[in-house]
Each structure stands twice: as C-alpha cells, then as structure tokens.
Image (spheres, rainbow, N blue to C red):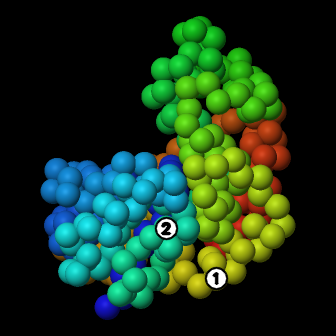
Amino acid sequence: MNKIGFVHAPRTGGTYIESLLSSKGPEFFINFFGTPENQKENKISLIEKISGDKKGQQKLLKIPNWETAQIFSGHFSLNISEYLPKEYHYEYITIIRNPVDRTYSFVKKITTSKRFESVLSSGGQYTPKDLEFWDNFMQYYESSSSAGLAQHELNGFSNYMTKVYAGCDLGTTIVVDEDIYQRARENLKAFKYVGVFEDYESVIKSFVDMFDLNVKYTIRNNSSKTTKPKKIKDFLQSINSYDQMLYEEFK
C-alpha cells in the first residue's frame, strides 16, 4: 500500500490543509503535530529532529494508524524516509511559496519565542511594522546568534525548502551548496504533487480531490502582498538564493 507524506514547510498554508485532512480521522491521516484532538495518538514532538531522537524513531514505527492511513504530515525533512515503516511505499507532496514572503512570515511567526522576540523588538520597543525590528533580525542572523531558538528553527531563515527537499538533518547546522541544491531539485521532480501557495485556491481544490475530502472550506487572503522595505527584501533574497531557484523552476 502506498503512503503519501505531506512535507509541510512552515508558512505555506499547510496547517489549514491539515485541518481539512483531519476531518477524515486519525485512521486516515497521521498528523505528527497531534492536532486537532483526534490526532493525539499520532503526535511526535519535534519530528524535525528525528535523526537524533531514538525514542522518536521507535514511536514513529509504533504509531497505530499506519496500516489504514493514506497520508501523514509534519515539518519533516525527506530524511524521515530512513525511519518510516519499511513495509510501505512512500510518495511525497508539498506546497512551495515565494521564499522572501515565506521567510518574512516565518520570522514574524516565531516571535512566539519570548527571548527571540525580545531581541528583535529591543525589549518591546519595536514590532514587525518597524524597520528597526528587521535591522535587529539582520544583525541576529549575521552574528549567527541562536538566542531563543532551536537549531531546526534557525534553519528556517535561509533556503529552508532546499534543505527539507534535499533530505538534510534539520537538527544540525546546514550550509546549502550546489550539491544539496541539485539533490533537492531531483527529489522535487519525483514528487507526486507540488502546490504553489500563491495559487492557494487551486492547492485546496487539489487536496480535496486527491483525498476525496467531503468538507466545506474557505479561501483566506494571504499576506504575500505585504509591503516590505527594499533593504529587507534584498536581504531575504540574498540568504534564500537556492530556494528562489527552486521556486522559479517548480512554481
């Protein structure tokens, strides 16, 4: 029986897709986040760090719904393939997003880390609407700071999509090079489906059709059109050059 892995890159609209998939229950859909309530038995904390998590590897194999599930999802890298039950064949799907917009949204999202938020806001003086906030982010990134964040979160700032599609270990520091980029390209070519966040209505319809979801859904306005200072846009482009190439090829 084939299983389909939804490689959920943060800030690509995947959480809403997962809520639709969850409507068919944990026997059909395995969500490593454990949400909503009916997914608790499928939960694996920090699936991003699976290669160094021996207990997580054992728990992954013992998830009770593998036999019936058609699809599983999480913020995993393709290196998860090494740790999945061996009796099944796996295919993958994903959603890609303009890397500047994805990273901009990601930085704002992970200010849920109070320490990280305090660094970027200078102790509460600035918000993401202020240029000073983003100046602080650039200093944070260029100084290789890790204040308030784990390694898998730090990997989210630059070429994250390339890292996960290449199968890199998100629990380690990754410097993307041409070999990693080419591996990501070849892997992405073999994906069963690649959706584009900027055409989110089409993405939702594709998931509904692929998995025969009998659900009502709404199309949200995305924030890709948020005006960004040129200085910040140029910086985010410069640290996501490989993701930009992937996006241009596969969108």
In the shown orientation, is residue 117 left or right of residue 221?
Answer: right
Query: Tag 1, which secondary structure?
Result: helix
Q: Position of residue 161 (x, y in %)?
A: 63, 60
Residue furthest to the front in view is 54
**Residue at the disc numbered 1:** 189
Residue kind at label 1, given as amino acid type: Lys
Position of residue 239 relative to residue 79, above or below, is above
Crowding around mark 2 (Cα neighbors within 10 Å: few <14, some 14 to 19, many 20+) is: many
Q: Which residue sits at x=45%, y=70%? A: 83
Give the number of the disc on residue 164. none
**Residue at the disc numbered 2:** 80
Quadrant of residue 160 in the image? bottom right
Residue kind at label 2, given as amino acid type: Ile
In the shown orientation, is residue 42 left or right of residue 60?
Answer: left
- Eye-nearest disc, 1 or 2: 2
Q: Which residue sits at x=37%, y=86%? A: 88
The front one of 57 and 4 is 57
- Mark 1–mark 2 distance (CA, rounded to whole Å): 18 Å
Q: Position of residue 146 (x, y in %)?
A: 65, 30
